[in-house]
Amino acid sequence: MPDRYLQAFTCPLPEDIARLKGAGEIDLALELIDRRLKKPLPEMLRARLEAERMLLSRLADSYTLTHEQLLHAMRARVKSFTDQELQNLLAEGLLDFIYVNGTRYYHEDTVGSLLKSQPGLNRRAEPPYDTDRSALDGVIRRMMAHDLAFRYRLRASTHVRTHEPGTLYRIHMPLAARSMQQRPAEEVAASILLASVDAEDAPQRTAYLESSLRASPDFTLEYTVEQRPRYVNALDESLRGPVYPEARPVCPEDLAEQPPHLAFTPYLRALARELRGEETDPVRVARRFYDYITDQVTYAFLRPYRLMESGAEYTAVNLRGDCGMQALLFIALCRVSGIPARWQSGLYAAPGDVGSHDWGEFYSERLGWLPVDCSFGGAARRQGSDLRWNFYFGNLDPWRMVANRVYYAPFAPEKRFPRKDPYDNQRGEMETDRRGLGDGEFTTRYEILWHEESEAET
């Protein structure tokens, strides 16, 4: 998505097009957009209509289940699931859907979202959806006793589904960066030409690869990561001094808007005022935001972020969102309250359990920068683990790989075509001389080859 489209989402849609979109009259809405684009328009309105045309054309790709299909899919996992239960979930606002030309369609990942976020359904599922994070309790207790160093070798294996032998592929794969709790990737190796590696402190660090993939549509990237997180009880007011003295200093961007997803809307400003009340201590204000999100926001898989208009506000209004949207809401609430906050993402990389993940950080004069994981905190809240719930305010487990430290940052070298994810990079970006590869055209799988845990040097 070109940069001009990202900013354009702050522009409202013309009323007639907005009404058609809301009513699910997608074909007619697209017709009106095409007619309007033939007329002279201010640049921002033109960009908004072009962005909306792209969004509406692709939105249905993520919403594929009719009511009957969703009911059938749920019964495949929860045999006793009833139509009335589905109606109740709809009434409670727990189902993501759109209307397309008169028919309601639900998000393709609705079953997984419900099994992950609703413990009652999970217990009835066959087989149960794996939401067990109790293994974290042990590592958290060890961290509370002494600082840990966690070192592991990670392999990313990528398969190109739309393979064109002889075509030069330009590839940006996420790579462990230097961060306050992580040492940068070591012993980087690839099965194809590793053309360059970003600086250790790149905002979205990548390994840049080039290859015709003539021999095979598959390639691998390996590197070693070391995590050294520290434990702190952030609410202990006797503690003074930065927990991570080596953290990147506060900069103006840590308090800035980043439309469309980090927009300081009137609703977010009002919500932040209501939640913080008369509290002025940044740590306690941030804890109020964390408590609200982990208590009130239900975890849910979402459509690609490029098909959403305002992520932080969407999460605040709908009270549902995935790890990234929960992180964005936390960051937005902090920033509108004058508390510096920023993004981190990459992987949750535990042995046997590796997947994309996002979280946030906030700053106070008393403790410096601290991490906050609202998604893991919310899961702990649902599972009744106060240990984990309190831990993820101010702390992270050592099973992480941080590749991205700035939300929406360019690559080096820059891509020639729009990114499939313009905001973040966790599974890689790929392009040829003719086009950028989109969702479903390549897949990346991660695995830990070996790992070791030790007490960190003091």
Image (cartoon, grey):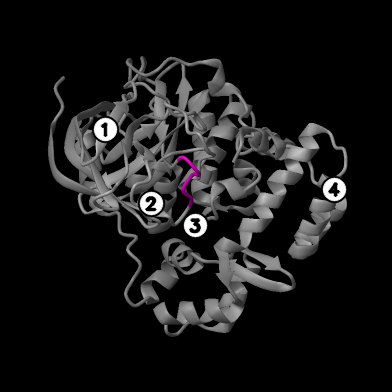
Indicate the quadrant where residue 163 lies. bottom left
Disc 3 element: loop
Q: Tell me which label, 4 or 3, sits earlier in the chain.
A: 4
**Hey, which residue is sitting farthest front in the picture?**
166
Kindly indicate the quadrant of the structure image that contains residue 47: top right
Characterize the local packing of mark 1: few (<14), some (14-19) or many (20 or more) Cα atoms within 10 angstroms: some
Residue hosting label 4? 36
Q: Which residue is mark 2?
A: 380
Q: Main secondary structure of the magenta part?
A: loop
Q: Which residues are the magenta region?
A: 433-438
What residue is disc 3 on?
301
| Badge 4 vs badge 1, beta-carbon distance below 8 Å | no
Residue flagged by tag 4: what amino acid is it? Arg
Q: Is residue 39 magenta?
A: no
Marked residue nearer the N-terminal end (3 or 2)? 3
Task: Tell whether 189 sits left or right of 306.
Answer: left
Towards the viewer: 381 or 105? 105
Note whether residue 396 is visible. Answer: no
What label sits on residue 23 in the rendered view? none
Residue that numbered label 1 is attached to? 194
What kind of residue is marked 2? Ala
Going from N to C along the chain, the mark reached first, 4 or 1, is 4
Query: Circle 2 sits in a helix, a strand or a loop, which is it?
Result: helix
Mark earlier in primary sequence (2, 4) = 4
Specify the amino acid type for callout 1: Leu
Picture coordinates of residue 268 (x, y %)? 67, 38
Query: What is the C-alpha distance between the residues marked 3 and 2?
Result: 18 Å
Callout 3, which amino acid?
Answer: Phe
Check the picture and name the quadrant holding the C terminus. top left
The earlier-in-sequence mark between 1 and 3 is: 1
As drawn, is 11 to the left or to the right of 393?
A: right
